[in-house]
Amino acid sequence: MVPLYLMAVIGFIARKLNVVGSSDNPVITQLMLYVTLPALILFSLNTTFSAELLVDFTWLVAMSVYVMSVSIVTGAWLRKRAALPDGQKSVYESLIVFGNQGFIGVAVSYMLMGEQGVIYLTLFNIFYLVLIWSYGIYLFTRHEADVYWPRLFLNPGILATLIGLVMLFLPFSWPDMLLRTFEDVGQMTVPLSMILIGSLLADTKMADFRRYSSNLYLWIASIMKLLVLPTTLLVFLFLQVPDLLLLVAVLTAGMPSATTTTVYAQKFRADAVFASYGVIYSTILCMFTIPLHYILLQIIGVG
């Protein structure tokens, strides 16, 4: 994890020195979302299909459906009991359900297991991607009728995953020159994602940071997202899931709250500031909880 933290420190310093401006953060996000992350997915899925890979795919999807279902039920239950204004309830629920599995998840998986880790992460994220572009939007628009459902299939993450899966089953592969391009462009995802996190943290105002740090619901959301929900996956220990698959599932499910929550909050007129600090707190805390999960899994013999 140390190299990842150092990349975030670089982003923090770059923002403080104004090498990276606040207007650059959305540009970096778009670059990762539409260019580097799809390229990394396409490169990672360039592997030989086998019966073993099909078994791995089945386990990963099963674990993803399980933990996302538990998260949705838990998030809905906590939202109903939260004494929050309407503009914060949908944010609170989204902070619990959806994590930063695309950016930080890729960084952690790649650092631990290389391209194989990204393959597992991509397969694990298929169900998540469908949900965050459908149910994630529904959380903020459940009382409206302007949801544009076709955007679900226009998400670059889903498109890259679907194309990669199709190529996985075909008897031929990408040309070497194109594959090398996917690799070179895709490898930028890890440093860019951590530099972005550092830059976002540098924009935090200490007065607001202290004020929101006393909000009980942001702490509950972080604890549920980072600690409680990922550990529910340990039930798969009794089903003899391969160690590496369970390792990827638990660490990915324990990622901090998704920055997409802030984007949705701003777009659909919810409390975007509340969302931003929910993401910031969980991102800071994940520096401790991700190693904690990894140590726990090593102690019980996983990985």
Image: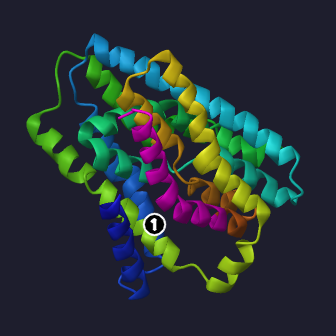
Left or right placement of residue 49 versus residue 125 in this view:
left
Where residue 228 appears, as percent x and y from the top left, is 64, 43
Residue span colored magenta: 276-303
Where residue 12 appears, as percent x and y from the top left, is 42, 77
Q: Residues within 10 Å of mark 1 (few under 14, many from 20)?
A: many
Residue 231 to residue 51: above or below: below
In the picture, the quarter occupied by the C terminus is top left
> Residue at coordinates 39% horizontally, 29% vertically from top-left?
245
> Residue at coordinates 53% horizontally, 61% vertically from top-left?
283
Nearer-the-camera pick, 283 or 188: 283
Q: Residue furthest top?
A: 51
Q: Is residue 179 visible?
A: yes
Residue type at the position of mark 1: Ile
Q: Residue furthest left?
A: 176
Nearer-the-camera pick, 81 or 129: 81
Left or right placement of residue 72 versus residue 106 in this view:
right
The residue tagged with tag 1: helix, strand or loop? helix
Residue 71 to residue 239: above or below: below
Query: Is 6 in the magenta?
Result: no
